[in-house]
Image: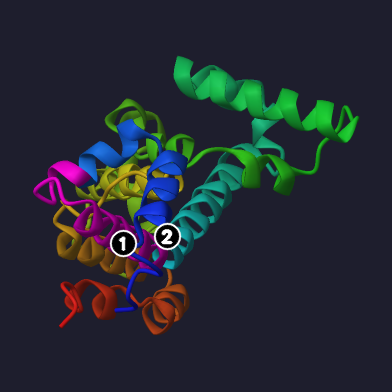
């Protein structure tokens, strides 16, 4: 592990101020009140987030495209405008879709959006929600979840949703620069490996070859 750039009090205080007292407090509390150790822990957390980003990215992109493909098959390429699809969405998902479409129309000054624009802008939460029990009967996930996860027949809807929901929460903490070092990251990593491989072997290989999680995780603390 690289050594933090400086333990000079001026540098340390400058960084503490930039991070904010409330954000730094979590790291300080887990470092016996030692500023230097707290900054090293913050550095380690940042590197963990960096190392897992590529896997959460691969998982999210693959999931949304798999479910988009399923929705296109069921409702047509412009499923996000199909009234049957919209009526079926639960309130929170309908709100998410409405917000996304409205934002994109406003930003692009267009009343007819390309489907890919909507798909790319919808949140991970929207896609994960489609695997929840709320949609089990309508989508017939009991028999059709294999369309999303063709490479792992042991995955049922509930297991797939649980893994994806944990991955969503991890992804959100990484995206919002929150601590993750205290989680069972080995379990999260195995989740990401399993769920990504279940969807696409190529994406799984790409993520595995480029993810540095093991190196970062197993290298802490530095010798």
Dominant SS in magenta: helix
Classify mark 1: helix, strand or loop: helix
Q: Are marks 1 and 2 in contact (CB under 8 Å)?
A: yes
> Does the magenta-highlighted stretch encompass residue 49?
yes
The spot of residue 87 in percent (x, y) is: 55, 17
Quadrant in the rendering for residue 138: top left
- Report the residue at 47% width, 42% height from top: 18
Q: Which residue is mark 1?
A: 195
- Report the residue at 71% width, 28% height from top: 101
Q: Mark 1 vs mark 2: which is more N-terminal?
A: 2
> Does the magenta-highlighted stretch encompass residue 140?
no
**158 is higher (above) or lower (below) than 51:** above
- Report the residue at 20% width, 79% height from top: 219
Distance between the alpha carbons at the discs numbered 1 and 2: 7 Å
Q: Which residue is mark 2?
A: 59
**216 is higher (above) or lower (below) than 174:** below
Residue nearest the observer in this picture, 97 or 154 = 97
Quadrant in the rendering for residue 2: bottom left
Q: Is residue 162 left or right of residue 114?
A: left
Residue nearest the observer in this picture, 78 or 6 = 6
- Magenta range is 28-52
């Amino acid at each position: 592990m690289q050594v933090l750039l400086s333990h000079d009090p001026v540098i340390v205080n400058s960084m503490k101020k930039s991070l904010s007292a409330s954000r730094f407090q979590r790291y300080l509390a887990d470092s016996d009140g030692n500023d230097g150790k707290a900054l090293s822990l913050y550095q380690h957390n940042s590197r963990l987030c960096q190392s897992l980003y590529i896997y959460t990215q691969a998982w999210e992109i693959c999931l949304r495209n798999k479910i988009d493909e399923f929705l296109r098959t069921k409702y047509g390429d412009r499923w996000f405008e199909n009234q049957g699809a919209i009526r079926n969405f639960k309130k929170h998902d309908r709100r998410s879709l409405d917000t996304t479409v409205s934002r994109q129309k406003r930003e692009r000054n267009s009343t007819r959006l390309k489907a890919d624009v909507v798909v790319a802008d919808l949140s991970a939460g929207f896609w994960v929600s489609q695997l929840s029990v709320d949609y089990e009967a309508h989508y017939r996930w009991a028999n059709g979840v294999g369309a999303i996860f063709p490479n792992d027949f042991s995955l049922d809807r509930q297991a797939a949703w649980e893994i994806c929901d944990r991955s969503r929460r991890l992804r959100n903490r990484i995206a919002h620069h929150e601590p993750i070092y205290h989680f069972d990251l080995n379990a999260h990593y195995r989740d990401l490996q399993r769920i990504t491989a279940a969807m696409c072997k190529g994406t799984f290989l790409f993520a595995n070859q480029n993810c540095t999680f093991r190196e970062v995780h197993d290298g802490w603390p530095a010798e």
